[in-house]
Amino acid sequence: MATNMDWLNRSLKAVWHPCTQMKWHEDGALPLAPIARGQGAWLYDFDGRRYLDAIGSWWVNLFGHANPRINAAIRDQLDRLEHVILAGFTHAPVVELSERLSALTSGTLGHCFYASDGSSAVEIALKMSAHYWRNQGHPEKNRFLCLTGSYHGETLGTLGVSDVELYKEAYGPLMRHAITVPSPDARQAVEGETALDVARRAAAGLEIVLAEHHTSVAALIVEPLVQGAVGMVMYDPAYLRLARALCNRYQVHLIADEIMVGFGRTGTLFAHEQASIRPDFLCLSKGLTSGYLPLSVTLTTDAVYAAFYDDAVTRGFLHSHSFTGNPLACRAALAVLDIFTEDHIIDRNRSFAERFTGMLAPLAHHPRVRHFRRRGMIWALDIDTDLPDFRLRFYREALAREVFLRPLGTTVYFMPPYILDNDETALLAERAVAALNAVLETDSPSLLEKEDSGSNVVK
Ligand SMILES: *Cc1c(COP(=O)(O)O)cnc(C)c1O
């Protein structure tokens, strides 16, 4: 029987792992964990160890691994139709999914354009927005605004609207950079200020930029309520309300990138609902299939759709991906939506969140923890530490305690699947504190041969 070591060695020889300095895998600073199977919230390796998947396998998994209902939906679809081109053809799963997603926006976003990953969904929104303005006789409106610390993907187009320096550094000359506007990060509140005050200040900053540049700007892109990759930055919904009003006033689209925050993560099905606004574009992926299959979608308004509807082919949206609207992935997404309604997930999450927040009190009140925060089903806290390799140390200490947590720099966060039982919840809370204390008490030498500040911000 193959062991962890067998798979680890073969993987290092053949696989280039994402978002990773491969040398750290080789020299053991960041050990590679081979996984044999998953069940519910747990991942199991080849040597009989298990890990509680407390970040939903990079924010995608909502309903656990090997979920019986999603498995059954995919199996059923597999016997009917695995894939068909979506240009010139259509099929039941993509029609049903589009109708249901649109209904979830109360019909305000009437058409769905599909791709296979989040970055592509963002690229589609960017291209559609600029192409809309071109079709409207305003080709000069082709620049974008993004928030400080924003993350919208890693293709060249999406890096251009992202503000995480580490990911962009090497590719600067290859991309077209967006204009960054202030983030409403609630942690910026000074003595006597509220998150609402910070939101208003950031919106005032946005207005200054819009007033100057609106004639050349196509869209503002935001991660509604929580900016993920930069460190689970949370902000007041008022910012979205103010940004929506400013976008209307200055004739600029609002793109809501809900790839991470969609599907209940922030406590409502979509994050923008908490601001009682609708975006012009809504990008979804990750939780859309509960992490089962690669699928993303960009929804937009009838007004945008109508601007492309014409006899001239060049006014159309000539964009496609080979696996656009894949039937298996769409069936997985339909099963996910069924689970949301049948199991009253949004309500159930609310009581789970209360319980888990209570269990995290030792972390919230830990002397080395700053800015303990929560929005819906995302918990985050900043650790007061100078350890350059905090992220790696915490990751290892948590894994040693059967818990899979992957800090963003010195920010520890929890993004658990929506299925934890009481024992799993308690185990996660207790072992996270134990891992933190183990890291903070250590005086072992750095895990990294070279001091590398970059090690602390990788997602
Ligand atoms: C993950 C993510 C993306 C990119 O999605 P991929 O599927 O990794 O390309 C874009 N925006 C946000 C907010 C994300 O969290």
Image: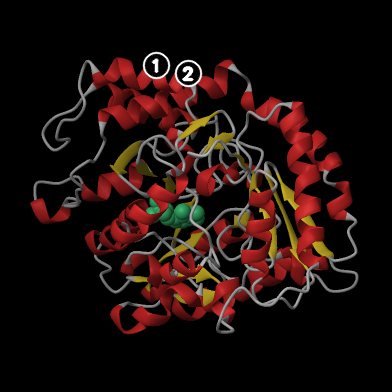
The residue at 82%/46% (across/down) is: 360
User: Crowding at label 2, few (<14), some or many (≥20) Cα neighbours within 10 Å?
Assistant: few
Give percent across and percent down for residue 56: 56, 42
Name the secondary structure under disc 2. Answer: helix
Q: Quadrant of residue 175?
A: bottom left
Name the secondary structure under disc 1. Answer: helix
Q: Could you tell me if the residues under marks 1 and 2 are in contact, i.e. CB atoms within 8 Å?
A: yes
Give percent across and percent down for residue 404: 61, 47
The residue at 37%/18% (across/down) is: 73
Q: Is residue 57 left or right of residue 242?
A: left
Q: Is residue 395 above or below residue 193?
A: above
Type of the residue with mark 2: Pro
Location of the C terminus by quadrant is bottom right
Type of the residue with mark 1: Ala
The residue at 51%/45% (across/down) is: 57
Quarter of the image where ligand 1 sits: bottom left
Q: Is residue 333 above or below residue 177?
A: above
Residue assigned mark 2 = 68
Q: Is residue 107 above or below residue 359?
A: above
User: Crowding at label 1, few (<14), some or many (≥20) Cα neighbours within 10 Å?
Assistant: some
Residue assigned mark 1 = 72
Specify whether residue 441 is in view.
Answer: yes
